[in-house]
Amino acid sequence: MDSIFIKEIPLEATPLGGNARLLISNPHLRLVNLILAPGEKVLSHSAPVEVVFMVTEGQGSVIVAHEKHEIMPGQIFTCPADLERELVADSGTTLNLLVIRTPNL
């Protein structure tokens, strides 16, 4: 059994935008803490599996298949596999969320 404090893991820039901490990565699960500064976004992309976003702080938007959805703290948002999506911190606040992908393909 392992225990970690999220803020002890350094943030790294991601190729699609924002900064992230890789918390868990194994064949069954990928868990990332993603942080977008106000006005920042993650470019449009897709994944071969369903992806779950759990908002911990701030507000923003998820755009899935050209449809915009507002997200806020405490909300869980599920994106189906193979659909284009992007994330935007468009509310004037830093958007902090957990990105959950299972299995990790």
Image (spheres, helix red, strand yellow):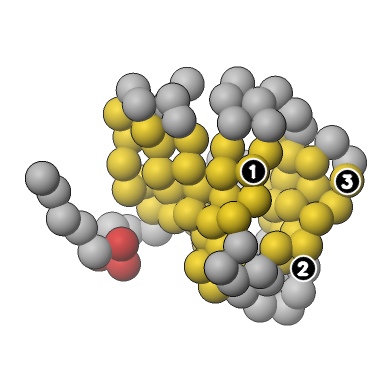
The relative height of residue 98 versus residue 94 in the rendered view (above or below) is above
Q: Which mark is residue 38?
A: none
Residue nearer the viewer, 50 or 88: 50
Compared across the picture, whether 45 is left or right of 103 comes to right
Residue 89: image quadrant is bottom right
> At numbered mark 1, what does the secondary structure look like: helix, strand or loop?
strand
Query: In the rendered view, does 10 fall on the left or right side of 76?
Result: left
First in sequence: mark 1 vs mark 2: 1
Q: At 54% from the left edge and 72% from the top edge, which residue is drawn?
A: 57
Direction bottom: furthest residue = 92
Numbered tag placed on residue 67 in the rendering: 3
Q: Name the residue under label 1.
A: 78
Spot occupied by residue 18 in the image (x, y as percentages of width and height): 58, 55
Q: Mark 1 and mark 2: span between their CA atoms?
A: 19 Å
- Quadrant of the image containing the N terminus: top left
Q: Assess disc 3: are there few (<14), some (14-19) or many (≥20) residues with their C-alpha within 10 Å of its C-alpha.
A: few
Quick one: label 3 or label 2, which is nearer the N terminus?
3
As displayed, is residue 23 above or below residue 92?
Answer: above
Mark 3 touching mark 2, by CB under 8 A? no
Q: Closer to us: mark 3 or mark 1?
A: 1
From the top left corner, tell me how far across and down residue 96 is, in percent.
Answer: 53, 65
Mark toward the viewer: 1 or 2 = 1
Q: Can residue 46 be seen in this view?
A: no
Q: Mark 2 points at which residue?
A: 90
- Crowding at label 1, few (<14), some or many (≥20) Cα neighbours within 10 Å? few
